[in-house]
Structures are given as structure tokens and as C-alpha cells.
Amino acid sequence: MAYNIGLLGLGTVGAGTVEILLTPEGRHPLLGDLNLYRVGVRDLHKSRAVKVPDGLLTTDLEAIVTDEAVDIVVELIGGLEPARSLILQAIAHGKHVVTANKAVISRYGDEIYDAANAAGVYVMLEAAVGGGIPVINPLKQALGVNRIQSVIGIINGTTNYILSRMEQEGSDFGDVLADAQSLGYAEADPTADVDGLDAADKIAILAALAFGGRVKREEVHCEGIRSISAADISYAEKLGFRIKLLAIAHREESSDATDRLQIRVHPTLVPHTHPLASVNGVFNAILVEGDPIGPVMFYGQGAGAGPTASAVTSDMINIAAILKTETEPIPHPLLSCTHQHYCTLTPLEELNSRFYIRLIAKDRPKVIGHLGIIFGDRGVSLESVVQIGFRGDLAEIVIVTHETREGNFRQALAQVKELEAIDSVPSVIRVL
């Protein structure tokens, strides 16, 4: 039995997916049951990296998602609209959906899941997080018997590439970003990557799967890497850390015995001994900790034609395998997203963390003493205070705190900034 595929989008990932579908030799035998039926594009005459059989291309994407002959719609056009509307139309017409669109799923996943459950179809999204790294289906299936405690990851290859280059070369952010854009590792508008928005989309999806509840994307705290300097990376290295943009989701037990989650994205000082510290370049890694399995790390290429197309096609195979054997039109519980309730996220000021602070102070007596008093009055214990040296009459001071409540730390920092002896506070970075 063959299943007709309606593909929306023939960009980098779409071309990689077509390449797999048209060259099934040596791959999984179920690929022989996937028939590339229609391919939706914006421009019929554009030069493409892959040769599509005659008669398959069309600019009418809506006709694909409503075509009775199409069994599986694969959405690879990206962006919020018309991707969201096309996915919902496909579901309304009884189509199973495979998507790599983390932005749509993180923002409209609740609407899409409800529609899919009501229609009795699958929405598969392995390619939405981590490119070719298999992490979505393991969270649904192999790790599903565990009580997941945390998901921590480097899930944006562009920022990891920039930070890795800054560390290796001692370069500043702006210089490396410009080079990354010229090499194609960063977009002309890098906002989604360097401001952490892409990683926030992805950790919202992972958290929903790991903790069995829906996550409101707008509640995920998000910071990017624009403020990270070569000086911060150098000082972090001397202190035994590397700076990474981490996406963190952590389950905590609240006082009323109900689960609350910490979900956030921000630059982080990661100890050299931590497994994520050695993940460099465009590579991604996701560290999952659960009971009883303990820590499990997924590592690989987080983007690109081959890795992402691999994940897209594996989702199609999973759907085909179930369709060949199911006797009732009810989504398989290990493939579906069935969580209904919304997770409660802990406010940022209530989180506990260690902090790295870089201060520029004027040459005044007792500056370090005043800093200790201010932090101490707010219950913030200082692990180390290092005065780096003078530039004219200004000294650079680097502080690392012990773990403390974020609200207390922010109150102390606001008071520090008011000191006449403090010229500026260039950097505040959390420490893992």
C-alpha cells in the first residue's frame, strides 16, 4: 500500500527530503510505500538543487492540503503564516502532518494538537528540534516511562558556532557574527538566533513533551548572546568555564506538592567538566535526566538539509508503519501528543542560580568592601572576587556568587549600580 505525500516547500530541507524519497535504495523498506505526489512551491521556474519528476510542482499549496488523494502533508515552508493555516486545513481534511516548524508548534501547538486529536490524525515534529538528532520520539516513547527531571540543551547551532569562534580566536561578537553571515551559518537578520528566540521555541516544545503538559511560549524567559564579549569568554576560561547559550527546563516540587517548571534560555557559564561544555561549532546537544534512567545525552547536527530531512522522513515512516497495521482510526498513544493541562512556570525572581558579574569600578578605597556588604545584606554570598587590573583610573572586577535567589540578587545588583564608585556593569551571566 502506498501513501501519497504532499510536500509544502522545496527549500534546503525540502530538497533533502525529496532526495531521500527518490533514492530509497539501501534505506528502510517502508520508504517504498511513500509516494511523492505533489510539491508546493512559490516559483515554478526557480532553479533547484534536486530534480523533481514532471507534473508534481504546483504553486497552489491549499490544493495540496485539501486533495483527497494526499495521505500525509509535510510542511517545510517555515514561518507562522500560512504554515499554521495550512496545517490546520490539512488536519480538517483528515491528513496526517509532518512538520519541522518549531515556531508554529511552540506558539500554536495547543490549537494544532486539539484539532489533530479531534480528527484522529498524527502531527509529527521530530525535525522541529535538533535537526537530525532523534530527541522528540525518544521523549515520547523510550523515555516515556521515566519521571523526567530536567532537559538542558545547546539547541541553536548559530549561537554555538559564534561562541565557539569567539573562544577560539578571542574575537568579539560583532566580528564573528558578520563572518558567520558571510559563510551562511547566520541569517541576514540573525535576531531569532542571537536573541535566543529560536532556542526558546524549541525548549517550549521539549518541555511540553518531557513533562506532559502544555507550555505557553510567551512565559519562557529568553536572553541572547549579543552582550557576551571576548573579555567575558576569557575570564570564564580562567575560572574553569565556557560560555554557552543554554535552553533549560527543570521540574521542581513546590510547597503544595504540585509540579512547577523552570523554563528559560540564556547565556550560561558551564564548567569544563560538564558534558555540554565540549559541544562546539554548529553542533547541538540535549542532556535529559530522568528517574530511573539517569542522564542521557543526544548529540549531533542541529540543522542542514541532510540531518533535518532525515528526521522529516523518519516521521513519515513512523506514520506509514502505523497506518499499515492499525485496525481503528485512533492515533497511536506513543506517537500522539495528548497532554491537555498547562504547566505552571516558576517566576524568574524565585529561581536559584549562581551568577558571574563583571564590574568597571573607579579607583576608590573600600569598593570591594562595599560590594560585599551590599550583596551580603540581600543574602547573596560571594564565592570569589577578583580585581583584574587598571585601565587609567578604572579597575575591572569579576565576581562569582554562590547559589542565590534571583530576586535577591537583582535587588543587590540594582543597589550596586547606584554606587558612585561603580562606572558600569557590562556583564551579568548565570552559572550552571
Image (cartoon, rainbow, N blue to C red):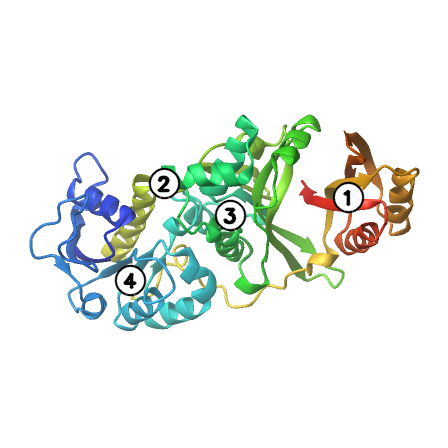
Q: Disc 1 versus disc 2: distance between alpha carbons?
A: 39 Å
Identified by mark 2, the residue type is Gly
Quadrant assignment for the N terminus: bottom left
Q: Return the residue found at the far front.
A: 392
Quadrant location of the C terminus?
top right
Which one is nearer the viewer's eye here, 37 or 149?
37
Q: Residue at x 81, y 56 (%)?
A: 411
> What residue is pinned by disc 1?
403
Sequence-first tag of 4 and 3: 4
**How far is disc 2 from disc 3 in space, using C-alphas?**
14 Å
Where disc 1 sits, the SS reads loop
Few, some or many residues within 10 Å of mark 2 (<14, 14–19, 20+): few
How would you rate the neighbour count of disc 3 (Cα within 10 Å): few for under 14, some for 14-19, many for 20 or more? many
Return the mark for residue 96.
Answer: 4
User: Quick check: marks 2 and 4 in contact, CB under 8 Å?
Assistant: no
Tell me: residue 174, above or below residue 344.
Answer: above
For label 3, the residue is 194
Helix, strand or loop at mark 4: strand
Q: Earlier in the sequence, mark 3 or mark 1?
A: 3
